Amino acid sequence: MAELTVSVDAMGGDSGPGVVVAALARSAVRHPTVRFLLYGDEGQLRPLFARRSKLANKVEIRHSPEAVRMEDKPSQVLRRGRKTSMWHAVEALQKAEAQVAVSAGNTGALMAVSMFQLRTLDGIDRPAIAALWPTRRGQSVVLDVGANVECDAQQLVDFAIMGEAFARAILGLERPTVGLLNVGAEDMKGHDAVKGAAHILRDCNLPMEFRGFVEGDDIAEGTVDVVVTDGFTGNIALKTAEGTAKLVAGFLRAALRRSILGRVGAFIASGALNTLRRKLDPRAANGGIFLGLNGIVVKSHGGTDSVGFASALDMAIDMARADVMAKISNDRQALELASAPAAALGGALGA
């Protein structure tokens, strides 16, 4: 019997279903007991499996005649997208036919479809998108990176709970360090939402170590294991980091190709350069995780290749095995129980 089942949107992304099927072949080797439900146009999918006989017993193709386009608005998909591969992939979670869903499609539409079908966990107001971020110390979790443009203090606290639960489950940290992204480390800096969240997190009794405020350069340093921010700031930070990595890689390639000595130096240092290339390769950490829903949804980058999509599948499988949703629910309930006596005392004193 399969260990778990992954629901996959085959029609999302920029490169079509060929990338998805190639990624499934990679993932099936890494996870031999996992089963996949593949949603998409059967006429396009069947020929892609002609030379992949090893996938025959691992992948079930389910015909979905329509696909969500990158330019489609979330509201349009909610009204008219119930025959799309994205809708059906998420629906498999709602029907308990799969434990996790993966798509490289339209981010806004995927979030809207996921929220509509799965709803949020008890006590969670809004879901967040979390990303693994390469740092000097290894990896950190950054959230939100795009789901919520504006957030209040309690929502930032919820993101901190989601992030520390994710770090414990996926990074194997017993007590992750958590920081709020701010314009300075001093207590008086920042807007009211960030200050309010810091006040709550300093007094909470959760399996985390709150380090206060961190700045933008602390993300790459790995100063904390979990960086919490609103989706507007987080998305800009993410895109800026991706662009900077591409810029540095381009400068390095140009410098090494400029002269014969540069080419000789590149040959001599090929081992170190390959290590650097792997560390800067965004495909290795591909996948934004929707946290806070009654189901695990992973958003792959739309422009990735089969290596990147396979990384997103790996992340999804790790999430399902680690039971991150249960950890988030337990920690959210613990915070509510800890806050209840203080709230009751405050009400009594006010009376």
Image (tube, rainbow, N blue to C red):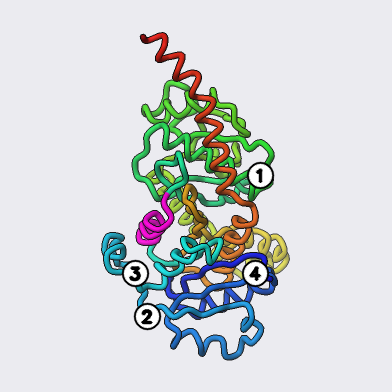
Asked if residue 48 is positioned above or below residue 114 in the image, the reply reads below
Q: Tell me the element at label 2.
A: loop
Sooner in the amino-acid sequence: mark 1 or mark 4: 4
Per the model, the C-alpha gap separating discs 3 and 1 is 44 Å
For the magenta stretch, what is the residue range? Answer: 107-119
Residue 272: percent from the left, percent from the top?
A: 70, 60
Tag nearer the camera, 1 or 2: 2
Q: Which residue is mark 3?
A: 82
Which residue is under mark 2? 65
- Image-based side of 49 in relation to 82, left or right: right
Badge 1 or badge 2: first in the primary sequence: 2
What's under tag 4, amino acid-wise?
Answer: Val
Q: Quadrant of residue 154?
A: top left
Q: Residues within 10 Å of mark 4 (few under 14, many from 20)?
A: some
Identify the mark at residue 137; answer none if there is no mark.
Answer: 1
Total numbered labels = 4
Please tell me which residue is depicted at 52% across the width and 62% down the height of the picture.
96
**Which numbered tag is attached to residue 34?**
4
